[in-house]
Amino acid sequence: MELIELNDIRKTYDMGDVKVPVLNGITLTVAHGELLALMGVSGSGKSTLMNLLGCLDRPTSGEYWLDGREVSQLLSDERALLRNRKLGFVFQNFNLLPRTTALENVAMPLTYSAGHCSERESRRRAEEMLRRVGLEDRAGHEPSQLSGGQQQRVAIARALINRPQVLFADEPTGNLDSHTSEDVLRMFVQLNEEDGITIILVTHDANVAAHARRIVRIQDGLIADSASGGAQ
Amino acid sequence: MSVQGTFRTAAKALRRNPMRAMLTTLGIVIGIGAVIAMLEIGAGSSSAVQKGIASMGANVLLVMPGTTSSAGVSSGAGGMVTLTPHDCEVIAEECASIGSIAPVVRARAQVVYAGRNWVPNTMYGTTAAFLDIRGWTLAEGETFSDTDVLSGNCVCLLGQTLVRELFQDQSPIGEDIRIMGVSFRVIGVLASKGANMMGMDQDDLLLAPWTAIKFRVVSGTLSMGNQSISSGSSSSVNTLSDLYNSPPTFYPTKSDVQTADNPTLTRFANVDQILATARSTGEISSAIQQVTETLRRQHGIREGQDDDFTVRDMTEMANVLTSTTRLMGNLLLCVATISLIVGGVGIMNIMLVSVTERTREIGLRMAVGARARDILRQFLVEAVALCLTGGALGILLGHGGSLLVRKFLHWPVETSPTGIALAVLVSASVGIIFGYYPAWKASRLDPIDALRYE
């Protein structure tokens, strides 16, 4: 059983009179421990695909098996639970809570977990995650006191706190300079290799995609090309 | 998400923008503060008004003897001779709802001082409690004591009209006046009260210990006539028994000589009415019930037999009192409602701004696993926390304000625990009512749109 199986996924946006098809039958398999890059130009449908994969949205039709479970028709509360337990997100603009310390930002998803852990336990786990991204000495800093790269690493720590099976990164280096981008991307590779976390990078940048083991190109809502990447 | 966690998150979110949280709360602070201050000042003035009306006699109960009829001719109210001073003592001891109580013996007689005379409109024999019951005060001198009542001392208090008629500008204190040939010393003068609601001059009055009036001035009858005119016969024999006047005619009439030889010291003492106060306006009905029960037992009236007395209250005045209180209450309620609505709209406004401003945060929270109801709860708790904090500050502000008013303006102020409880309840409900729409709006956001919101 593969971790992710998409079977003829279609997504059509209903804009009143006009129906806008965005995904036109995507079939894709992602195995455990893969480091995958979804590539495509703006408007190709790669963000929509990521939203579907991340259970933020439901496909119009098609099947989506995640870890052995059909999740395409789940209700929004069930999807929220799924996101909390199995999925992690890293965004282009970091999306950290302003005026909130790095530690609290990292611990935030735990407040929505079903089995509540104690304040002390959340702190401990958040500290551990910060250590993993190399920011243990910045735990008390607020986002405004951190550099872009550091902010993105805090966001990665936040995405990892619930030990997700899949980590989605939507243009994770879009707001970073090339040097910091390299750091962040190395961290993804490291997480993938050392901890076996499945990572899906969404990007339009070939340099970013080059770090992935496999590159899936999306064009006009269809998979144009799926090839092994040039990483390492 | 645990309740505790929700509160922590709300507190953190509010702390991120303390200035705005404070300004938002200000609406509620002022609203609740105004309500508390108004309630306390209002309760104070309301009870001052109540006291004022009560001093007009709204709490007063009047116990009158019953009526008799003979051959179909009724003697009218108070025709029976059934109330005794002992009844008065028993009522005072046994009726919990009765505040003070005084027996009243009425008389009508000529009062003489130096060359002048006057027949006061009202001449009451009573106890010192009478002044408390009516809320009357003395302009000068002092009132008579219980000892004066027990020993039937001939002392009296005069009303202003009587003083004017008998003494003109002279002070009457310490002077002796004569009532039906009995000398009474004036020990006090009552403060002026003007006319009562029926237009009767309340200053045309003489008060004395009831024992003195009963046994030295009035005979045992309930005659309201001018006793100075009708009782001339008793002075035909010159004996000490004059002091006790003629005994009631229950016994075979004695000849003048017999009477002179064996002065009858029978003190069959009835009183014309009993005046009492209920402890509060609310206790009037229970007071009436207790007095009725006590008197029925005291008079040995069996089940099914009619009372030989009647108890009356001042319903008219009590009604004025209730309607005044209700009016003030409603007035305060209007002011309170308006200020709380204004405060609530302020909260709603800011919460809506906050939801818009934090759209990305909401999207993020949803992406990491917050369900719609978690978001709803978070924003609702934030609004309620704002309102409750505002309410708490408002209570302090309002209470402080009313204390200042008491200190500097000397207005009557009453702390009202119900008002405070109400304020807490109301501020929480304002938070829920006005926080619900923004919270609902937040919870309905689509995580994808919310995350992309600029």
Image (cartoon, rainbow, N blue to C red):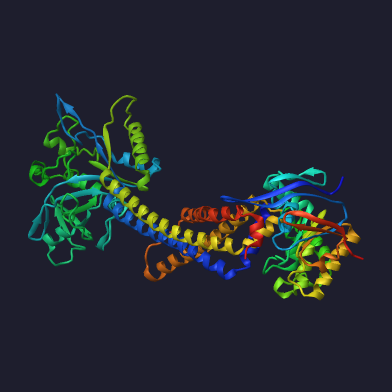
Residue B393 screen position, x and y as percent: 52, 64
| Viewer-proximal residue among B198 and B132 | B198
Instruction: Name the residue at 76% across, 56% down.
Output: A118
**Image quadrant where one finds the C terminus of chain B:** bottom right
Q: Is residue B61 above or below residue B184?
A: above
- Residue A39: image quadrant is bottom right
Picture mark count: 0
Residue B214 screen position, x and y as percent: 21, 44
Residue B411 screen position, x and y as percent: 37, 65
Say whether residue A40 is left or right of residue B32.
right
Instruction: Name the residue at 56% across, 58% down.
Output: B383
- Residue B220: image quadrant is top left
Say whether residue B236 is left or right of residue B132.
left
Instruction: Name the residue at 82% across, 64% down.
Output: A209
Say whether residue B440 is left or right of residue B78.
right
- Residue B378: image quadrant is bottom right
| Viewer-proximal residue among A108 and B316 | A108
| Viewer-proximal residue among B164 and B227 | B164
Can you see residue B74? yes
| Viewer-proximal residue among B134 and B375 | B375
Can you see residue B368? no
